[in-house]
Image (tube, rainbow, N blue to C red):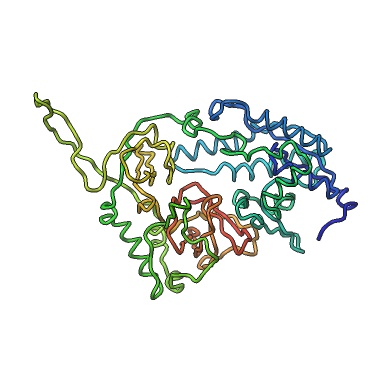
Amino acid sequence: MELSESKNAKIRVCVGLSGGVDSSVAALLLKQQGYDVFAMFMQNWHEADATLHGDCEWEEDRFVAEMVARKIGIPFYFVDLSKEYRQKVVDYMFDEYSRGRTPNPDVLCNREIKFDAFLRVASKMGADYVATGHYCRKEVLPDGTCRIFEGADPNKDQSYFLCQLSQEQLSRALFPIGELPKREVRRIAHEADLPSAEKKDSQGICFVGKVDLPTFLKQKLTSVEGDIVEVFDAWYADDPLYRFQQDTLRSLLKDGASLEQTVRYAPEEKILTSDGAPLGECPYREEALASLDTSILEHLCAPLSYDIRFETEVYRSGKKHIKKIRYKSNPYGVIAGRHEGAQFYTVGQRKGLGVGGHAEPVFVIATDTAKNIVYVGEGHHHKGLSRFCLAIAPDEIHWFRDSLRMAPGEQRRYRVRIRYRQPLQSATLLMRENALYILFDSPQRGITPGQFAVWYSGDEMLGSGVIL
């Protein structure tokens, strides 16, 4: 129910004004609705060494944000949260990458900075709420419980980045543009002649900017050369774990259902087309899923371990028959190149490999930081890119509403995404004592340890967790 302007005037709101068009319009709408609004700009990063343009992007953002606040007619403040950001976000990133995992700094930034450190500062300044320019929607139930939904614009929905917020944080949050499409936000900004109306959307790491990731990570992680190993299709036919996973999944299918091995890909659209449709009927026999032993689920979720040995042989070369050493031909793979450190690569990565001579693109399918090896495969349909199942540790499972928590032995059907802007994928969640298992109806590209899996019922975001 819409509050009257007179009642809104008693509610003090701090807008996290970033200098972008989204937060600018959020501030403008709140001001027009009669709230007592003030803006605060966060500086969370000082160093520009790793950014691609090498300048202090935050200085320009602050200048634009201050002009926007002046144009709207609201007070403007500045807060330096760089110490908290380094401790809670950047150090976490370094630690995760060092272990061969891929964190999501934007999710951590929202949980630890925008709706924690920033919220505490805003509260000291009298704010009842903190507002941001996120494209998502919030609803408060009669008992005070908050629900969070996808943004109305399917092309700009940012609920994924808020997947770790607590009820307490949600209760203090406002998302003024969640009901609007991006084009409408731009139109409002133009009509109000806001200085940020034409500003491009930010890219890269939250508050750091667009970076060369290896250069950024080399601030703390040592660069050590290692092999890039290309895995051939023949390896999968002989790998016991891969065969077990495929055979088990087929045994669980309902009569008439089929199993795809890899993600469907539409090259003309450059998008992954796997699922994305409304939640449909489960292709697996539900009673068979309920009876699955934990050890079987663990094997279904286990990433493949590529242990391809390369033997050398001596051969003679040239007119003088000089002895040289080369690797023997191996049906399972080939050493395709060199890298500067396995911790600098992530599953699904295409750029920065330097592996040429292929008809199709080459992607990272796995990394082994202990042995410092990066494994790659050729083509969007390479088997190593696709997996069906993932697991989340019990202490990493986050539910927005306690009343919806799953009990051990329970299973439910939800739609799930494992990365921002991925179309929602139909899946079955199976709760066990040792983990929450998510089994997808169709194969998923690049299930990556350290990233967040987020599940939805309709357009409501229900929970999330870090992928093991």
Q: Residue at x 69, y 31 (%)?
A: 80
Name the spot of residue 35 as percent of width and height, x first. Answer: 84, 47
Name the spot of residue 363 as percent of width and height, x first. Answer: 39, 44
Q: Is residue 179 above or below residue 201?
A: below
State the count of labels: 0
Quadrant containing the N terminus is bottom right
- Considering depth in this image, is 66 or 218 the residue closer to the camera? 66
- Considering depth in this image, is 216 or 55 the residue closer to the camera? 55
Q: Residue at x 42, y 62 (%)?
A: 294
Q: Is residue 189 above or below residue 59?
A: below
Name the spot of residue 330 as percent of width and height, x first. Answer: 21, 45
Q: Is residue 328 left or right of residue 91?
A: left
Q: Residue lying farthest bottom?
A: 255
Q: Residue lying farthest left?
A: 320
Name the spot of residue 419 as percent of width and height, x first. Answer: 52, 50
Q: Is residue 433 above or below residue 24?
A: below
Residue 288 found in image quarter: bottom left
Q: Is residue 172 above or below residue 280?
A: above
Q: Residue lying farthest top?
A: 320
Residue 18 found in image quarter: top right
